Amino acid sequence: FRISCFFDRINLMRILSFSLEQFRSFTRLEVDLEGPNVHVLLGPNGAGKTNVLEGLCVLSLTRSFLSVEEADIIQWGKEFYRVKAQLEDDHGEKSAVEVVSQILPRKQKACFINDVKKSLSETVGHLPTVAFLPQDLELFIGSPAGRRRFLDLLLCQVSPEYAQALSQYLKILKQRNALLKKISEGVAKRGDLQQWDILLSQSSAIVTLKRLELMEVFQCTLTEELQSLGELWKEAVLVYLRKGEARTEEDLIQEMQELLKHCQERDVILQSTTVGPHRDDWRIDIDGRPLVTFASRGQQRAAVLALLFLKVSFLELRRGEKPVVLLDDVFSELDDNHQSALLRCFDDYQVIITATHVPQELEGAKVWEMGKMGKCLTK
């Protein structure tokens, strides 16, 4: 499996304007982003800068880049939120994307492209984005859930099949776990698991296969990316950690069914499914050793930056569009060399940055003061 570009020309996708309504701390916010490629949202901590980036990610992914419930995103005391953006590519082709989510009178979400209602999977990635958050710098020492989410948020933007399979997998997983609880309590039979095991195996095979393919794509240039950041390691290897060794969809389905059967007794006792993509993990090995066991904090951050660059390249090559890059207060966490590398990499992209002050390297960017709606400072 190798990196390949399916497009003769890569378009630059830009956000012309966007609005948030009853979203987090904003009753209503409207911002016009025409002008330079680099925009800085300036303000102290707690001013709502991250909320703006979160809103843009909701437009891109139909969900937050944070592990939160929809009710947490809706402004306190309100029943719904709405986020909307006007987009334009290099050809001058414009489009609009909108996501509306409500919790009352019943929980539901609706998505629109050019005012035409679309499914969640059709909407995901219409606005391609890559976000870099402070917590991403802790990727390797954080939880496996964070590393799985790192893969999921990227794959959902390039593969509707993956987005659908992941959604189905999580729904079936919830049903299977509910059944395991009933079996444990003696109100259901073990034989009832068979139909759920078949369905779970089918969706899990697609999820696992797409993740493995992504690992192989990243592997092609991972060592080179690390070396460009000053980490002169001989060999960097991405390792996907899972139970089983199957590599084709058919074999993955069969393997998953066997694993579920093997783990059935434990699953019933724990009332939870203990094997599958929701339990998988991944790591980077450097010259045969897990990165996290020896790398300094600076080296780990270089590895995260390398993966960020690979995410952007992967999204660009598979969609034929340069994504919008969202950087949330990361300059305060990076040294000068890594800051410079970050800015060089995204020189030809639309970049939206949050910061408590304007770094010297960003002079010439369009600067927005949070709390002063529509006010722009030109450095």
Image: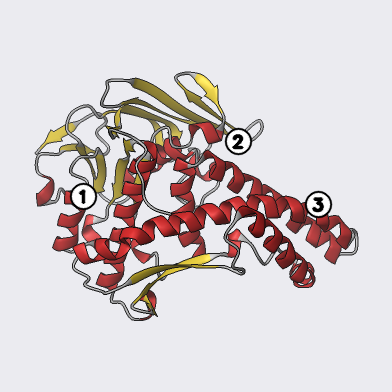
Q: Is residue 303 above or below residue 75?
A: below
| Mark 2–mark 1 distance (CA, rounded to whole Å) | 40 Å
Q: Is residue 311 above or below residue 160?
A: below
Confirm whether residue 3 shows in the render: yes
Confirm whether residue 80 shows in the render: no
Q: Earlier in the sequence, mark 2 or mark 1?
A: 2
**Residue 103's disc number:** 2
Q: Residues within 10 Å of mark 2 (few under 14, many from 20)?
A: some
Quadrant assignment, res 372: top left
Quadrant assignment, res 257: bottom right
Q: Is residue 336 left or right of residue 237?
A: left
Front label number (3 vs 2): 3
Q: Residues within 10 Å of mark 3 (few under 14, many from 20)?
A: few
Looking at the rendered structure, the secondary structure element under dot 1 is helix
> Residue 184, position in %: x, y?
84, 66
Check disc 3 and give the amino acid type: Gln
Check disc 2 and give the amino acid type: Ile
Check disc 1 and give the amino acid type: Cys
> Residue 61, position in %: x, y?
46, 40
Check disc 3 and report the residue beneath it. 195
> Residue 291, position in %: x, y?
36, 75
Q: Nearer the viewer, residue 257 or 345?
A: 257
Check disc 1 and report the residue beneath it. 345
